[in-house]
Image: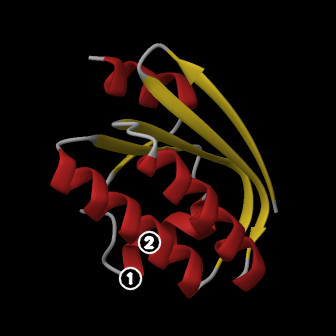
Amino acid sequence: MTLNEEKNGEVYILSLKGEIDREGARTFQDRVTQILDSGEQRLLIDFSEVTYINSPGLSVLILVAKRLEKSGGRFALAGVNDSIQKVLRISGLTSLFSIFPARSEALAALSK
């Protein structure tokens, strides 16, 4: 898995590519923890190039949602493919964060 990062106004964008397996989840968690520790309050995670996510990856999403909820921040996912949306739905996680079909929609929602 690879990560690309950028900032758009007050929104920090983390674009993921590949599989979020055990090793990918560790990398993802380490980086997202650094981002949140630096004080970022609006985070968009772009899943448009993610092909797989496992339980450790889902745990990272839960961690992000809980940390930002506690600090009054906001979090959204964009570009989540059908198979990953199904995993999120089956896991009961869709209520923890906003999911948008496109990055531009998520960015607009977080920029308000």
Q: Residues within 10 Å of mark 2 (few under 14, many from 20)?
A: some
Q: Position of residue 97 (x, y in %)?
A: 31, 54
Q: Position of residue 72 (x, y in %)?
A: 17, 43
Name the residue rendered at 61%, 65% in the picture.
30
Question: Eyeballing the image, is 102 above or below 3?
Answer: above
Element at badge 2?
Answer: helix
Specify the quadrant of the image occupied by residue 8: top right
Q: How is the image coloured?
A: secondary structure
Numbered label attached to residue 59: none
Q: Is residue 2 above or below residue 106?
A: below
Residue 18 visible in the snapshot: yes
The quadrant of the picture occupied by the N terminus is bottom right
Q: Can the viewer see residue 87 in this picture?
A: no
Q: For the residue marked with disc 1, what is the amino acid?
A: Ser
Front residue of this view, candidates 97 and 70: 70
| Label 1: which secondary element | loop
The residue indicated by pointer 2 is 88
Question: What residue do we see at 57% from left, 23% from top?
Answer: 7
Image point 52% across, 22% down: which residue? 104
**Residue in view at x 26 percent, y 64 percent:** 66
Who is closer to the viewer here, 37 or 104? 37
Q: Amino acid at mark 2?
A: Leu
Q: Are marks 2 and 1 in contact (CB under 8 Å)?
A: yes
Q: Is residue 111 left or right of residue 12?
A: left
* Picture quadrant of residue 107: top left
User: Distance of mark 2 from mark 1, alpha carbons?
Assistant: 5 Å
Query: Callout 1: few (<14), some (14-19), or many (20+) C-alpha neighbours within 10 Å?
Result: few
Measuring from the top left, give residue 12's x and y in whole percent: 51, 31
Residue that numbered label 1 is attached to = 91
Compare residues 35 and 103 and report the one nearer the observer.
35
18 vs 89: above or below: above
